[in-house]
Amino acid sequence: MKTFFNALIIVSCWFLVLLANTIRVPQDQSSIQEGISAAVNGDTVLVADSTYYENINFMGKAITVASNYILDGDTNHINSTIINGSQPVNPNAASVVTFESGEDTTSVLCGFTITAGMGKWYSTYSARVGGGIYCYNSGCKIVANKIINNSVIGPSAYGGGLAAMPEGSSAWVVLEKNQITHNTATANSFLALGGGVNLFCHARIDSNSISYNICTSNTTGYYTAEGGGIRCGYSGANPPPEIIMRRNTVTHNSIRINGNPGQGPIAYGGGVLIQQCNGRMTGNDISFNEIWDYSNWGAVAMGASVSQSPDSFLIEGNIIRGNTYAHGSGNSYVGGLLIGGSDAISVINNLIEGNAATYGGGVGISQFINPCTVVMVNNTIINNSATDGGGIRINQATAYIMNTIIWNNQAPTNAAILNINSTIEVAYSDVQGGSPWPGTGNINLNPELVSDSLANTSLCIGAGILSYDFGGGIISNSPPEDINGRMRPYPAGSHPDIGAWESKLGTPVGIEPQSLAGIPKSYMLEQNYPNPFNPTTNIEFSIPKSEFVTLKVYNILGEEVARLVSERLTAGRFKYEWDASGLASGIYFHELEAGNFTQTKKMLLVR
């Protein structure tokens, strides 16, 4: 209810602004560009549902250009209000939307489909840049748009969906709640940067979907292709760009190298590449990105790469899963997360799972031109694979690892951690191997992971530490929340768990067999059945004593969609039917809470 009233207030505020000074297209002006020309700072250009064959320029104005989405939040307006840039007056200025006259984040674009742009010719770098949106020496705020099927093709190509080229500007670019998909950047002679987005600037990138973008290099020389989904960074900028990247979904992007075999170029960052920036990357899902390398020259960081941060960078609460070297027979380096050439990078509360490369399946840490020191706390690194360093590969660097699970990673040798001329200190971690990894508090026990959490019998529960002094001024502290935002440690006053998830138990609980009398001896939440289901499914659970019980269902965003139980129950086994009629297909979670016991299971609704 609170969320509803907040949304109502926001819509009401927008409505009052629109009433103040609104130029309507096509009622007041026949085109979006004419609306912009007639506007003054503070105005709103409100665009009716239709398709507009235009290439618009904000002309330095602090205005809002929006579809009717801004009035009622109906996403159908985004799909129905289309700016198609396929008919530019000047083929060298073929971006759909342009900011190039000193705009800042008071220049807002909201609620459109931006498509068929071919970018701006940028002679300084012999590059075609910014297929959908081009920002030069300026800032902007891009909110709730669908940036789709734009492309840039040139000797160099930057930012199929969007490119920002501030050239020393201190302006910020804000990308919020956009869908950036099926854009391409194709370089035929030199650099290919950012299939979806390329940013040479300060940026806040929040709650976007960046998926199915492609960065392609057809060059034959030693050039690079970087950032299948998004690339951030600018060499030599002073001060260096600050990047705040949070709550984004970066999935199914790719880099494709078509150069001559054995002659390059090199691909970096199938999903994300952040280079020479300060800032943070938090709460993102970076999954199922790929590098295709037909030149067989070299592929680096199939999922994400963060390197050469001048001051500090935080990598926290991300899921980095299923990224891989998809095509080619050359060497590939680091399937999940590459960290290089930085002395102050913190890696906290991340799940790094199921990634694959030739060298370094899950995490790679390397000096990468400059010395590299990394602190890793409460991460879960599992099910990754490589020919060496299945979990972590550390090459001429320094790593301090605490409260971390490194388990079931695959490699012929050094499946958990490969040390190449590096300094590695490990404490209070669960590292798979013949015996506990050298260091204080380490264990070598199956962590018993179930449905992205710890089983109640896991010996990782309560086996971590709140703070550990590695010496030399390196003191690691366990974060106050886990990857899902739950309090750590739980309960207060206990020891934290090892890994990215915090159980609601202070210590592991043994599971006893069911009593003959039918009263269970332990708490248990069963997997729903049938699963997948449509539209009904059964959920069963057991409690060994009278407790106040809640049984809730959440969607993948963590929003409660159903509450099946909220009452005190006697000891016993219970069964409830959930009817998901009216809900969309997708992943849902059912969670049982009884006293201090909590357990969550995943289920799939398929229409």
Image (spheres, helix red, strand yellow):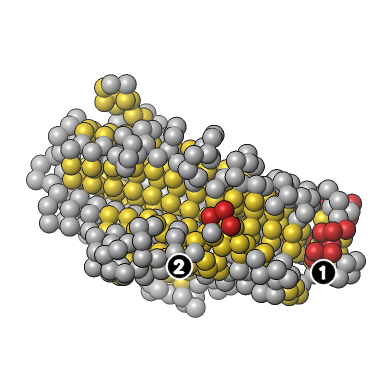
Name the residue nearer the viewer: 229 or 299: 299
Given the image, on which type of amino acid does mark 2 rest?
Answer: Asn
Q: For residue 201, what is the image quadrant? A: top right
Taking 224 as reference, is 72 left or right?
Answer: right
Name the residue nearer the viewer: 421 or 453: 421
Q: Which residue is mark 2?
A: 188
Taking 27 as reference, is 540 left or right?
Answer: left
Report the residue at 26% width, 65% height from top.
262
Report the residue at 56% width, 62% height from top.
128
Circle nearer the viewer, 2 or 1: 2
SS class, disc 1: loop
SS class, disc 2: loop
Whether residue 540 appears in this view of the structure is no
Question: Percent position (x, y) of residue 543?
Answer: 35, 53
Report the residue at 26% width, 34% height from top.
398
Report the residue at 28% width, 47% height from top.
364
Numbered mark located on residue 31 in the image: 1
